Amino acid sequence: MSVFTAASRRTAGLRTAAVAGAALPALVAGAPLAAADPGGYASAESVPACESHHVKVIENGRHGAAGTIAFELALLHIFDGSGACLMPGSVDVRWIDVDGEQVGSWAVQRGEPGEPFVLDEGESAEFTMYHHRARNHDPQECEPTEVYGIEYFVGPDGEGGRAGMGPGIYVCADTEIEGTSLSPVTPGPHD
């Protein structure tokens, strides 16, 4: 399981760039990229890496059981004229307060990241964010704090996007408590 911290954020961006660069020889040799657009692309050079400003987070639903909330999230590639981009198989996420300051630890990746894939404008990618409720922990250790939402980081640009998650979500402010984890990012349903 990978743990992302502020210091490892740069490393994660480099990993995304390396994965995108590693796909280039396979594409030039004619191998398909996982979940590539049916129109196809000649090479990875023609498909830039997706970045946070290319997508917005949409909550598709949430459900909870046994002290955990599962947020079903989509990353919708907005129509901005940039064309298709290469979506990495993982994103970095952290909880933030209304002022945009981090609350608690970074979310951790569950298992291995997914494979990168081409995401065209108007298409979506999906992942699930699992959050262990703050009340599952000793309040004195946890320091339950209400949050505004999440800040998410896609690709190597280092700039994050923000999404409000609604009132009443509490996170452990103690950064030693890893209360949130993420599934790999996968292609969403395409029409």
Image (cartoon, grey):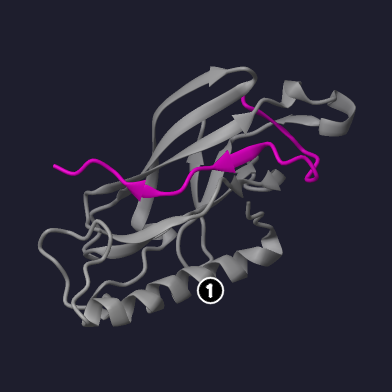
x, y (%) of residue 128? 46, 37
Label 1 neighbour load within 10 Å: few <14, some 14-19, many 20+:
some
x, y (%) of residue 77? 29, 52
Query: Which residue corresponds to the image point at 21% horizontal and 63% vertical from the top-left?
Result: 81
Q: Is residue 166 visible?
A: no
In the image, residue 154 sits, relative to residue 191, either above or below, namely below
Q: Main secondary structure of the magenta part?
A: loop
What span is colored magenta in the figure?
A: 169-191
Residue 25 located left or right of residue 111: left
Q: Quadrant of the C terminus?
A: top left
Query: Which residue corresponds to the image point at 63% horizontal and 55% vertical from the top-left?
Result: 2
Question: Could you say whether the residue bearing mark 1 is in a helix, strand or loop?
Answer: helix
x, y (%) of residue 42? 16, 77
Residue 53 located left or right of residue 176: left
Q: Residue furthest left?
A: 39
Inspect the magenta stretch and tell me whether residue 82 lies in it. no
Inspect the magenta stretch and tell me whether residue 172 lies in it. yes
Camera-nearest residue between 26 and 124 = 26
Q: To which residue does mark 1 refer?
A: 14
In the image, residue 170 sits, relative to residue 89, either above or below, namely above
